């Protein structure tokens, strides 16, 4: 039997309709709460956001009743250290990425595959490992989570041609500057500039040594290197002195990354300083995990709650730190609920028996929300989370 000509076969579009949204968090710092109750996505991309009466539901292949719960962009973890698939040798744990999915994380950014046993440090080996990681994690998405990996740690001896080669092979980021042999500001600045010339983004380690054998990277080195992201400005784990953190906020225009595996007091100082400078758009969130403190599936949610409750930041603004801010700084197509972006969402509600009357109030009181559903590229990746406290109300799939 002859097959139809594929060029003449009409393509069936996947159409996702989410209706009855009680609260829509846009991820946009300038307008964090959007007045809408319905989202339509076509083939994994947001097509329209608005009121139900204004959006045509015809042809929807997947319909979700949000049941009045809150829709937010999927959370982005700006600082992870993946190695091989969904296994981490740092704590010899399998399935850690899938666990983060149940914490609302839909996108991860590698700060270097530095926990790889026997990690090569020669130029051929480090470039090969970065290209391998970029290829492997582009094709491997546990639970649908998108992992941007392949982040080489710079070493002495690298020249401009090495960064050109890496970029042409698809590498788009460097691992933490300072975790390799390059630890002085002048050399780091030259290599960061070469990377930037070829479209490769950079992150620098900030603070005391993370493990035996690593080194202190202080504010003078950070300022000299001028990497795109000031990685774990609140320490990973050990933070710089307060005056150095304030100086980095004031003197550098770069992203200020606050991590779960850092100093909480330093995190609050960073946020308050950024707010005084009217630079909240520079705040992004990561976990800096897996690490000695383990795997933290709820790390990003915990940071949102911590910063909101102790720094008196509205919960909807704190959500932007882990979504739209990171998306814009990291050049991602997710993180904001607007047409053309990836249809990647987390649906939350206040946890059962939280004293907060609403999900935002519960977060601002320091509680974690409950996750009722996670959607990645227009596909349901998880329903009620196995890791968060149970949500009061969860969405329902009414057609699939």
Image (cartoon, rainbow, N blue to C red):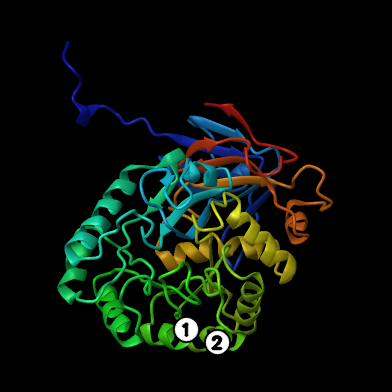
Relative horizontal placement of residue 379, taking residue 51 as reference (left or right): left
- Give the number of callouts: 2
Disc 2 on helix, strand or loop?
A: helix
Above or below residue 36? Residue 316 is below
Above or below residue 260? Residue 369 is above
Q: Which mark is residue 252?
A: none
Task: State the image coordinates of residue 234 (x, y, percent, origin top left).
Answer: 57, 73
Task: State the image coordinates of residue 78 (x, y, percent, origin top left).
Answer: 47, 61
Q: Which mark is residue 244?
A: 2
Q: Residue furthest front?
A: 212
Q: Which residue is mark 1?
A: 218
Report the front residue among 10 and 261.
261
Disc 1 on helix, strand or loop?
A: loop
Above or below residue 86? Residue 156 is below
Q: Quadrant of residue 390?
A: top right
Give the quarter of the figure containing the N terminus.
Answer: top left
Task: State the image coordinates of residue 206 (x, y, percent, origin top left).
Answer: 47, 76
Q: Residue furthest top?
A: 1
Task: State the image coordinates of residue 123 (x, y, percent, origin top left).
Answer: 19, 66
The residue lying at 20 percent from left, 31 percent from top is 7
Q: Are circles 2 and 1 on residues that touch, CB within 8 Å?
A: yes
């Amino acid at each position: 039997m002859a097959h139809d000509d594929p060029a003449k076969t009409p393509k069936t579009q996947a159409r996702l309709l989410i209706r009855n949204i009680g609260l829509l968090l846009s991820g946009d710092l300038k307008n964090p709460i959007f007045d809408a109750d319905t989202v339509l996505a076509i083939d994994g991309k947001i097509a329209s956001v608005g009121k139900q009466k204004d959006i045509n539901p015809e042809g929807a292949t997947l319909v979700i009743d949000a049941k009045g719960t809150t829709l937010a962009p999927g959370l982005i973890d700006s600082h992870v250290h993946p190695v091989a698939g969904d296994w981490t040798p740092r704590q010899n744990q399998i399935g850690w990425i899938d666990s983060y999915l149940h914490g609302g994380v839909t996108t991860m950014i590698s700060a270097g595959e530095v926990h790889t046993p026997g990690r090569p440090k020669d130029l051929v080996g480090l470039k090969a490992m970065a290209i391998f990681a970029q290829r492997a994690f582009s094709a491997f998405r546990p639970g649908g989570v998108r992992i941007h990996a392949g982040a080489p740690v710079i070493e002495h001896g690298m020249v401009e041609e090495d960064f050109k080669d890496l970029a042409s092979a698809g590498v788009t980021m460097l691992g933490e500057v300072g975790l390799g042999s390059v630890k002085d500001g002048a050399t780091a600045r030259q290599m960061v500039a070469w990377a930037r010339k070829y479209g490769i983004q950079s992150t620098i380690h900030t603070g005391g040594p993370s493990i035996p054998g690593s080194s202190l990277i202080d504010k003078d080195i950070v300022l000299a290197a001028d990497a795109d992201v000031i990685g774990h400005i609140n320490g990973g784990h050990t933070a710089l002195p307060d005056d150095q953190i304030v100086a980095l906020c004031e003197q550098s225009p770069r992203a200020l990354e606050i991590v779960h595996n850092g100093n909480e007091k330093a995190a609050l100082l960073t946020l308050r300083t950024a707010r005084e400078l009217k630079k909240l758009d520079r705040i992004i969130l990561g976990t800096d995990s897996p690490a000695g403190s383990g795997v933290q599936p709820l790390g990003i949610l915990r940071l949102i709650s911590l910063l909101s409750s102790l720094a008196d930041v509205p919960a909807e603004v704190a959500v932007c730190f882990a979504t739209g801010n990171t998306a814009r700084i990291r050049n991602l197509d997710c993180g904001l609920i607007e047409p053309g972006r990836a249809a990647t969402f987390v649906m939350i509600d206040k946890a059962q028996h939280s004293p907060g009357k609403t999900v935002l109030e519960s977060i601002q009181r320091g509680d974690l929300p409950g996750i009722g559903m996670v959607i990645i590229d227009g596909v349901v990746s998880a329903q009620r989370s196995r890791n968060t406290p149970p949500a009061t109300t969860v969405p329902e799939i009414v057609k699939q």
